[in-house]
């Protein structure tokens, strides 16, 4: 019975054994356990708070999801920074000593963690300046897809093949980024069309506009048009320009569906789609071919 009563005292004694010192303050096992538990609790609570801001407080506003996510992330990181300082004070760690330690770690960061630091700073720039936001259709390098998450270190992009690509945030600051939906998801695509010189350009223009007007993915409130680009080597060259909102992330699908519709429309009206050809003219006359001089063997 006495042994059972002594167990709590033994555990307390083990937890209070000094492991090392930060300045004049001893750090015990209890200090480390408290620091870890409180910090994990801080991360969990701030994540819940972010979801509350994004999905509840700002859900009924006219602010788009990207702005709501950025606002929630910024609030979360500010609270984490303040909460971490409060936790250090709560467990009894002198902040002046931590400041000296942070300075020493800063030197290590400058030499060994430049890439990570660059990504962290770039992530904060993305959250504040918002050149991209969640839901945007972007193209960076050889990657094209929709932004689904922006964290401090990296951004997640989902391609049309449903592949998640994790891109370091520094890529968005140091590289050229094409944002297809920066202001709106309405995008205009240009599709080249070639027809034979035998056809009437005005009739071709009318048929192409009919095809664009009958496609459900082409915006009717934004006028489609046809440009007579040039007289090609063996054909008239037109450009069909259409606006779309539903096919912003699938331009290849829209191109394919319009090409099918154009092919059907041209067949119905006997419009000829040309193929590259060359005309060779042979003139009568004599061609003199000079024989090469004989070679002299050494």
Image: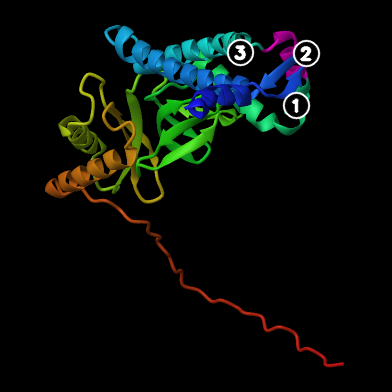
- Place of residue 209 in the rendered image (x, y in percent of width and height, measured from the top left): 21, 32
Q: Earlier in the sequence, mark 2 or mark 3?
A: 2
Pointer 2: what residue?
24
In the image, 33: left or right of 240?
Answer: right
The percent coordinates of residue 281 (x first, y second) are 43, 65
| Marks 1/2: CA–CA distance | 28 Å
What's the residue at 62%, 19% (across, down)? 31
Q: Residue furthest right?
A: 298
- The Cα atoms of the two marked residues, 3 and 1, are separated by 29 Å
Residue contact at pointers 2 and 3, CB within 8 angstroms: no
Q: Residue at x 23, y 38 (%)?
A: 204
Tell me if 173 is positioned left or right of 52 in this view: right
Q: Residues within 10 Å of mark 1 (few under 14, many from 20)?
A: few
Q: Which mark is residue 91?
A: 3
**Local crowd size for mark 2, using a 10 Å CA cut-off: few (<14), some (14–19), many (≥20):** few
Q: Helix, strand, or loop for circle 1?
A: helix
Per the image, is 97 magenta? yes
User: Which region shows up in magenta?
Assistant: 93-103
Q: Position of residue 91 (x, y in %)?
A: 61, 13
Could you tell me which secondary element the residue under label 3 belongs to?
A: loop
In the rendered image, residue 113 lying in the magenta stretch gets the answer no
Mark before the other along the chain sequence, 1 or 2: 2
| The disc label shown at residue 110, or none | 1
- Decide: marks 1, 2 in contact (CB < 8 A)? no
Q: Is label 3 or label 1 in front?
A: 3
Which sits in the foreground, 49 or 217? 49
**Residue 14 visible here:** yes
Q: Which mark is residue 66?
A: none
Compared to residue 215, the image places residue 276 above or below, namely below
Secondary structure predominantly adopted by residues drawn in magenta:
helix
């Amino acid at each position: 019975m006495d042994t059972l009563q002594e167990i709590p005292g033994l555990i307390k004694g083990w937890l209070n054994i000094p492991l090392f010192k930060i300045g004049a303050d001893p750090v015990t096992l209890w200090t480390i356990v408290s620091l870890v538990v409180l910090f994990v609790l801080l991360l969990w609570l701030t994540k819940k708070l972010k979801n509350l801001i994004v999905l509840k407080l700002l859900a009924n506003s006219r602010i788009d999801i990207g702005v709501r996510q950025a606002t929630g992330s910024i609030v979360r990181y500010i609270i984490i920074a303040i909460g971490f300082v409060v936790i250090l004070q709560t467990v009894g760690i002198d902040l002046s000593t931590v400041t000296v330690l942070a300075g020493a770690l800063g030197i290590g960061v400058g030499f060994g963690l430049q890439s990570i630091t660059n990504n962290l700073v770039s992530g904060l720039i993305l959250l504040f300046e918002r050149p991209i936001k969640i839901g945007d259709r972007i193209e960076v390098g050889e990657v094209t897809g929709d932004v689904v998450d922006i964290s401090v270190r990296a951004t997640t992009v989902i391609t049309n093949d449903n592949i998640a690509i994790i891109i370091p945030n520094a890529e968005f600051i140091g590289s050229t980024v094409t944002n297809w939906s920066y202001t709106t998801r309405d995008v205009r695509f240009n599709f080249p069309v070639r027809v034979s010189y035998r056809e009437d350009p005005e009739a071709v223009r009318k048929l192409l506009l009919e095809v664009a007007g009958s496609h459900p993915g082409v915006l009717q409130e934004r006028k489609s048009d046809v440009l007579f680009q040039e007289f090609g080597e063996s054909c008239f060259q037109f450009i069909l320009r259409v606006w779309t909102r539903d096919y912003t992330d699938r331009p290849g699908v829209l191109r394919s569906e319009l090409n099918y519709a154009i092919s059907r429309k041209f067949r119905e009206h006997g419009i000829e789609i040309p193929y590259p050809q060359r005309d060779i003219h042979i003139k009568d006359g004599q061609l003199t071919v000079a024989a090469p001089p004989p070679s002299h063997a050494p």
